[in-house]
């Protein structure tokens, strides 16, 4: 029987249509997710399901909240024995390993700072992270070659301790590494509460931008409270349900959908450890484990539709969500016809929780991010900081005076970038959008990505959305190319699907296709076919690399 733990921290009201109207959070100064949520449930409802984990090799494990408490306490003791203490920076590279969930709780209980990272890191990425954050310890998976990239760490003095999960590793851990699983198993279960404050650093994400080195976004101990709305009103999890967000533990999407808000709502989490994404396998797992709420990028929903939704029992699903990229109406409609569920889009950043979204009870408009979250003061403003009327493009900003739970507190060791983002009482997202007469927000692009051609402001996002509906297009990036007459022209850089050739006829076909689907002035006057797009380690397309290359070519041609 659930006890509605979330209501301890939230005051909310609803309008006459049952839609969320006002939303305020509150919490004590010593709030700690590990003690006040996980341990609370473990003590009062020990057999409540916390985590169902499986992999593509036939292994499966289920953890109750009592299991997570016990294993996190043992992990805290194990790490303490090896010199990790409150305030220390700990790099966590655990892919989809189930150990991540009790490691994260252990670090929160200890007052150590967790720094999740992807298993795709290479030597220079690891060296940069360890040096930038003065990382003291690393907990790394054996289920990916990433541990081999840590040999450079031998020459970095701040890193004092490395341990490796051993559950998928064949044989003893390599020299220089400690066996995490054996060490935790041998550690004591007795752990006393460590004092922490909500303004202490709890979590750091390296945000992989489209240019420059990643910034270190700092979240404090109030951050989990900010995700109650994410789980309750966007994911719409239910306490006895099973929620699945498709995300690796190295990214902030994992914090959004596979930890904080869901467990505060007393819901179970589903995790799938796999070597290669398979849309049919995903649908089979939804059916097998009776997943109730599900979230992943629109690209994956396109893959489910292309693989064929027929023959899969998806009737357990009650809510489905998307975020991170454009959604075309064809995918929206196919999914709705097959499941009766609308894809509920949301928007936020590594630095935030959900700030704009299609929340519970709303009617989504395909392609719209939704409406501002009642949790925050959200607006679209012009260059002078004035609120934009409907139809006018501006920057999305979030009020931070007073500072709300769920919004990052700054970039570690970088006052300049912090001040360039947090100023004037707002967090300036750098993302451009407009709103319609109904208050729905429509994404335009990043500040640096918007194209200015012949007096028009053109959204790359909008053109990419159109191009992605053409059957030839696997991936695309729309950028600006310098032009002496128009200032800039629109360029589409396209990765083709198998079976298509990058001919002049196909270029003309695509140009005419865009002219037909949107305002003619937006069509790409330049089209280039490539084998792959330049991307950051987080998978974001680096449009800046395309722009810089085109700029260099333009300057070379003009010499």
Image (spheres, helix red, strand yellow):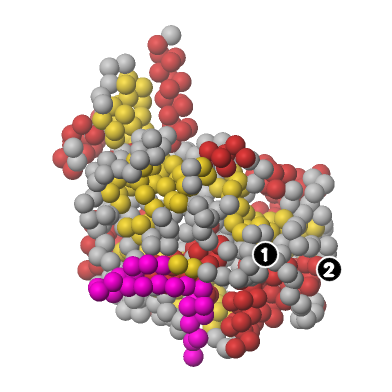
Residue that lies at the very extreme toward the left in this rendered image: 516
Q: Name the residue under label 2.
A: 81
Q: Per the image, is 8 magenta?
A: yes
**Residue 117 lies in quadrant:** bottom right
Residue in the image at 27% along x and 17% along y: 485
Which residues make up the magenta segment?
A: 1-23
Residue that lies at the very extreme toward the bottom in this rendered image: 1
Q: Is residue 505 above or below residue 158?
A: above
Q: Per the image, is 360 magenta?
A: no
Q: Which of 41 and 173 is in front in this view?
A: 41
Is residue 256 left or right of 386 when viewed as pictured?
A: right
Residue in the image at 81% along x and 44% along y: 155
Q: Residue 306 location in percent, x, y?
A: 30, 60
Q: Regarding mark 2 in the picture, which secondary structure is present there? A: helix
Q: Residue 45 location in percent, x, y?
A: 57, 88
Closest to the camera, between mark 2 and mark 1, is 1
Q: What's the mark number on residue 490?
A: none
**Residue 556 lies in quadrant:** top left
Residue in the image at 78% along x and 67% along y: 79
Marks 2 and 1 sit apart, C-alpha to C-alpha, by 23 Å
Q: Regarding mark 1 in the picture, which secondary structure is present there? A: loop
Q: Mark 1 points at which residue?
A: 197
Q: In this view, does 492 lie above or below 412?
A: above
Q: Residue 248 location in percent, x, y?
A: 54, 60
């Amino acid at each position: 029987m659930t006890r509605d733990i979330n209501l301890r921290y939230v005051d909310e009201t609803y309008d006459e249509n049952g839609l969320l109207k006002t939303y305020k959070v509150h919490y004590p100064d010593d709030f700690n997710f590990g003690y006040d949520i996980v341990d609370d449930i473990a003590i009062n409802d020990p057999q409540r399901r916390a985590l169902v984990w499986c992999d593509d090799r036939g292994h499966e494990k289920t953890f109750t909240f009592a299991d997570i408490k016990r294993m996190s306490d043992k992990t805290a003791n194990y790490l303490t024995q090896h010199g990790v203490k409150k305030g220390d920076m700990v790099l966590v590279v655990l892919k989809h390993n189930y150990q991540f969930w009790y490691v994260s709780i252990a670090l929160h209980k200890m007052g150590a700072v967790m720094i999740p990272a992807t298993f795709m890191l290479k030597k220079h990425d690891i060296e940069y992270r360890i040096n930038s954050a003065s990382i003291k310890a690393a907990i790394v998976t054996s289920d990916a070659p990433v541990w081999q990239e840590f040999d450079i760490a031998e020459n970095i003095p701040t890193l004092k301790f490395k341990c490796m999960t051993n559950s998928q590793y064949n044989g003893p851990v390599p020299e220089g590494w400690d066996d995490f699983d054996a060490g935790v198993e041998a550690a004591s279960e007795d752990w006393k509460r460590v004092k922490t404050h909500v303004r202490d650093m709890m979590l750091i994400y390296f945000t992989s931008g489209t240019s420059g080195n990643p910034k270190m976004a700092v979240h404090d101990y109030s951050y989990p409270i900010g995700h109650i709305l994410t789980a309750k009103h966007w994911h719409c999890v239910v306490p006895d349900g099973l929620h699945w967000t498709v995300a690796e533990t190295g990214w902030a999407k994992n914090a959004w959908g596979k930890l904080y808000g869901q467990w505060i709502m007393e819901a179970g989490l589903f995790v799938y450890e796999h070597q290669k994404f398979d849309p049919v396998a995903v649908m089979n797992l939804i059916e097998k484990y009776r997943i109730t709420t599900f979230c992943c990028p629109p690209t994956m929903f396109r893959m489910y539709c292309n693989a064929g939704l027929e023959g899969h029992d998806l009737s357990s699903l009650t809510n489905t969500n998307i975020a991170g990229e454009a959604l075309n109406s064809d995918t929206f409609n196919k999914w709705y016809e097959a499941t009766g569920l609308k894809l509920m889009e949301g928007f936020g950043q590594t630095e935030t929780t959900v700030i704009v979204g299609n929340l519970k009870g709303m009617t989504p408009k395909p392609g719209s991010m939704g409406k501002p979250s009642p949790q925050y003061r959200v607006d679209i403003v012009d260059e002078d900081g004035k609120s934009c009327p409907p139809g006018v493009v501006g920057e999305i900003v979030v009020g931070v005076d007073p500072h709300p739970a769920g919004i990052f507190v700054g970039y570690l060791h970088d006052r300049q970038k912090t001040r360039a983002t947090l100023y004037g009482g707002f967090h300036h997202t750098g993302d451009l959008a407009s709103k319609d007469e109904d208050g729905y927000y429509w994404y335009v692009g990043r500040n640096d990505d918007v194209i200015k051609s012949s007096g028009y402001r053109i959204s790359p996002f909008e053109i990419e959305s159109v191009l992605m509906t053409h059957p030839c297009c696997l991936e695309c990036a729309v950028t600006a190319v310098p032009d002496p007459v128009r200032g800039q022209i629109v360029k589409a850089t396209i990765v083709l699907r198998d079976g298509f050739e990058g001919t002049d006829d196909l270029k003309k076909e695509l140009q005419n296709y865009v002219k037909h689907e949107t305002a003619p002035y937006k069509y790409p006057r330049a089209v280039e076919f490539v084998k792959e797009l330049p991307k950051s380690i987080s998978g974001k397309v680096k449009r800046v690399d395309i722009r810089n290359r085109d700029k260099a070519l333009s300057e070379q041609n003009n010499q």
